[in-house]
Image (cartoon, coloured by chain):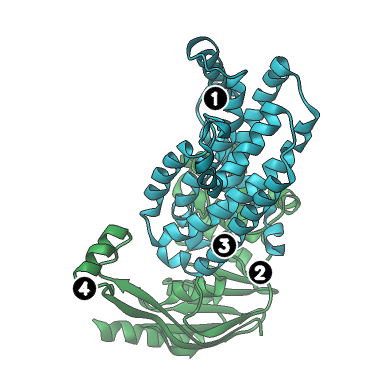
Chain colours: A cyan, B green
Amino acid sequence: MKELLNYRYLLFNLVYKEVKLKYRGSLLGFLWSLLNPLSMIIVYTVAFKYIIRIKMENYAIFLLAGVLPWSFVVNSLNMATSCIIDNGNLIKKVFFPREIIPISTVAFNLVQLILAYIVFLPILAYWKGLNLSLAFLPVLLFLHFLFALGLSLLLSAVTVYFRDIKHLVEVLLMLAFWVTPIIYPLSMVPERFHIFMWLNPMTVFALAYQKLIYSGQLPGLPSLIIMLSWVIGAYAIGSKTFAWCKPKFAEEV
Amino acid sequence: MVARIEGLSKYFFIRHNRSYFLKERAIALLKGNFREKKERFWALRNVNLEVKRGEFLGLIGPNGSGKSTLLKLMAGILSPSKGKIIIKGRVAPIIELGVGFEPDLTGTENIYLSASLYGLTKKEIQMNYDEIVRFSGLEDFIDVPIKNYSTGMQMRLAFSISLSIDPDIFLIDEILAVGDEKFQAKCFEKMEEIKKKKTIVFVSHDMHAVKMMCDRVCLLVRGEILDEGSPEKVIDSYHKVMAAEE
């Protein structure tokens, strides 16, 4: 842990590099990071306000509340599966804490999510007004970050040994999108299936974002406890597995 | 004593039918040969070595004799299969070509990226920045993306960055062959200066440089130390080994 702190500037540089290289050579450059979520927000709003008229008040806001953090997790995990292999060149040549690589991957995606909120929150303020409960958003983002990081540590390490996992994760995440209450509220799901919904760790996060952004309420204590258990569980398993796998990375990538 | 290596051995698995994919593993399982065909290749066998403070140690040997593996073990990139390595102080990363350079970033950005990869903080890099640029002699190209650099220019930048890390042990792997004569002379001069207070482990096939620079030389052949001692003596046995292999 102490060693990781010494390398925090490397973490910053790796994230900076990703952000910079993502839009290299384009005229608008960094602005795309803001234009991208903006266009998504506009498309959803137009589609669900004027075309597909869902019988739910402010459905576009509900949808965006769930979709933005969902993309954060999906992009993090999809990038995480290949991040050790992609950085094989560094791993084979320099000694540095290997954890930095998955951490920078998730941090890069967190930056993308925060940029999306920078676009989204003013629009939300215009439509609905801002609520004091939004002050809890940074806490939720931090917990979500740790959860995604735990899974990313796990996936990045095991993919070095089993390359299928990359493709498996892509398919599973596509499935997971439909069994997580993102485009529909949990109340729409028949009561007897709720237990299965709750077995999905993504559910508790999606509901918390919806509560915060759509309903303007804080998540309840039970859901916070469930969330914390997922965070601790994912992080414990992820960091253990990663620590166990990492001595051989330099030989396997 | 700055580094001690005791009974160090390292093997790699050579896999003849390595399957990274689950399907291939499953098929292999059905066919009854789940165990992959793998052999142990011993890159280093029972190496014992002591490096003293302020020593300039040369490592020579034919290709594939384990010199680079030994450096990687000392740098902490690989972990030993047997034996141990005790190091007192900070080890510089192996000085090699363009480690961690990102072709699309400029020279300056790469200095920051690459130096932070070696564990330097922002402050430390800022303090050393001018010196790095000055030593590399790339003042005019420092704002240009690295992809437009020649190999020699990239190497100059890499070497200049490594110098700024201020470690106790330098590990140098066959690097100086790329620079032009002027830069080589500059590097040798710098190494003479470093030598006074730091330890250097130097891998090279350039016997002239080894004879000129090293206090002591080790000859590695097939992962074992065959000879060690004064440069003249060990270079002589190196030539004998090479002649015998022909």
User: In the image, what residue occupies the spot 48% across and 55% down?
Assistant: A155
Residue where numbered disc 2 is placed: B194
Disc 3 marks which amino acid?
Answer: Ile
Q: Earlier in the sequence, mark 3 or mark 1?
A: 1
User: In the image, what residue occupies the spot 60% across and 55% down?
Assistant: A100
Q: Which mark is residue B66?
A: none
Q: Nearer the viewer, residue B51 or B10?
A: B10
Question: What separation in Å lies between label 3 and label 1 (alpha carbons)?
Answer: 34 Å
Q: Is residue A18 above or below residue B238?
A: above
SS state under label 4: loop
Which quarter of the picture shows residue B10?
bottom left
Residue where numbered disc 4 is placed: B32
Which quarter of the picture shows residue A28?
top right
Count residues near mark 2 (Cα–Cα under 10 Å), then give few for <14, some for 14-19, many for 20+: some
Disc 4 marks which amino acid?
Answer: Gly
Question: What separation in Å lies between label 1 and label 4 (alpha carbons)?
Answer: 52 Å
Residue B244 visible in the picture: yes
Residue where numbered disc 3 is placed: A237
Residue where numbered disc 1 is placed: A36
**Whether label 4 touches label 3, CB < 8 Å:** no
Question: What separation in Å lies between label 1 and label 2 (alpha carbons)?
Answer: 52 Å
